[in-house]
Image (cartoon, grey):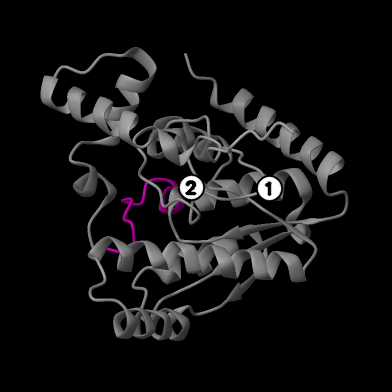
Amino acid sequence: MFDAEKTRDDIVNWIIEYFRDNGKGCNAVIGISGGKDSSIVAALCARALGKDRVIGVLMPNGIQTDIDVSYSLCEFLGIKSYTISIGNMFNALMDELRSKLDSVSERTTINVQPRLRMSVIYAVSQSVNGRVASTSNFSEDYVGYITRFGDALGDFAPIAKLTVDEVKAVGRALGLPSLFVDKLPVDGLTNKSDEENLGFTYEILDKFIRTGICEDENIKNKIIYLNQTNKFKFEPIPTFQYEP
């Protein structure tokens, strides 16, 4: 029942309206990872604003084995891009943390990277009259497979209400080559695929999100658990309501 072409056009029009109301003449700035989400968001922005108003930011930490896909995406779309390594700042921060804390957890080490990258994206955006595009999708958000104050951030979110399967369908409707749509999703942090980290496939997750059906009771319970325990990532910061 999903109409990819209509959804593509609706998102494009929504981006046009967003920039008309919130940044007339501004550029869309996108962290380009080489994955489907950033590729498709960049393509949507290029269609909405024109390629001259879309800027990609590539942020390797040392050797990024699939960075050639990011370069290929920018070349395919004809958008300007900047490559800004986070390696030195990551190493300096981790050295400082390890010298001051009794221990630094593995999750801390993993999550520092997307938070540094988001700082870089906003630094670029502020310097090029930009608005930062969030590349989060609904499937990842649903189970909290994001880093709070990292890849979850942005000024506008074109695909945040679309599941992985729906995002990919929009990518095909945009005419993107399979390289940018069907590439195996990896987090770039743990050397594992997204599905290996989650413990289930996006196909199973997407079906549960849209229909509530999951044949495997253990996986169903895990999805529900992840959804419930990660809700805090999307709720407003609890604020004391002072009444003078």
Mark 1 = which residue? Answer: 45
Q: Is residue 139 left or right of residue 75?
A: left
Whole-percent x and y of residue 50?
77, 52
Q: Main secondary structure of the magenta part?
A: loop
From what the image shows, is residue 48 above or below residue 11? below
Three-letter code for the amino acid on which mark 1 is drawn: Cys
Residue 218, image x, y percentages: 11, 25
Viewer-side residue, 103 vs 79:
103
Element type where label 1 sits in the image: helix
Question: Which quarter of the figure is the C terminus placed in?
Answer: top right
**Looking at the image, is mark 2 or mark 1 earlier in the sequence?**
2
Residue 24 is left or right of residue 229, and the answer is right
Q: CA distance from mark 2 to mark 1?
A: 12 Å
Q: Please tell me whether residue 179 belongs to the stretch shown in magenta.
A: yes
The image quarter containing residue 111 is bottom left
Dot 2: within a 10 Å radius of its alpha carbon, few (fewer than 14), some, or many (20 or more) residues?
many
Instruction: Characterize the local packing of mark 1: few (<14), some (14-19) or many (20 or more) Cα atoms within 10 angstroms.
Output: many
Q: Position of residue 184 (x, y in %)?
A: 31, 51
Q: Is residue 115 left or right of residue 42?
A: left
Which residue is painted at 25% across and 53% down in the image? 193
Q: Residue at x 77, y 48 (%)?
A: 49
Left or right of 19? Residue 93 is: left
Q: Residue at the front extreme?
A: 244
Question: Which segment is the magenta one?
Answer: 177-190
| SS at mark 2 in the image | helix
Q: Which residue is mark 2?
A: 37
